Amino acid sequence: MLGRADRTGIIRPEHTKLMASKNGLIPAMVLVDGVVAGTWRVEVKRKTCAVAIRLFEKVSAKDRKAIEAEAASVAKFLAPEAALAVTFGD
């Protein structure tokens, strides 16, 4: 995303401002069909690996299931022994 002057092919203009942060770091992105559809973050606490997903707009049930499956895969990689908690929110 950083290397493109015109980002409209990978992120909708109204979503660009949702990617901004105070320190200039770009959050991890959720992609649907190659387009940024939201952000995600992981937090490992004790015996739980929580993946919080923030979608910019509604996605199909099929895409939501695929996003959840990818979140589970990331959690299993980062904390194989931890219980998984995937949340969708604002």
Image: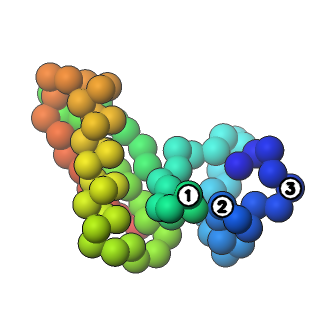
Mark 3 Cα-neighbour bin, 10 Å: few <14, some 14–19, many ≥20 = few
Q: 2 and 18: which one is in front?
A: 2
How far apart are the alpha carbons under marks 1 and 2? 6 Å
Quarter of the image with the C terminus is bottom left
Q: Residue furthest right?
A: 5
- Residue drawn 16% across the image and 28% down it: 82
Q: Position of residue 74 (x, y in %)?
A: 33, 35
Which of the two labelled residues, at mark 1 and mark 2, occupies the earlier sequence position?
2
Residue 22 visible? The answer is: no
On screen, residue 28 versus residue 47, left or right, reads right
Q: Disc 2 residue type?
A: Ile
Residue 45 occupies quadrant: top left
Label 3 belongs to which residue? 5
Label 2 belongs to which residue? 10
Which of the two labelled residues, at mark 2 and mark 3, occupies the earlier sequence position?
3
Label 1 belongs to which residue? 34
Q: Position of residue 57 (x, y in %)?
A: 46, 75
Which labelled disc corresponds to residue 44? none
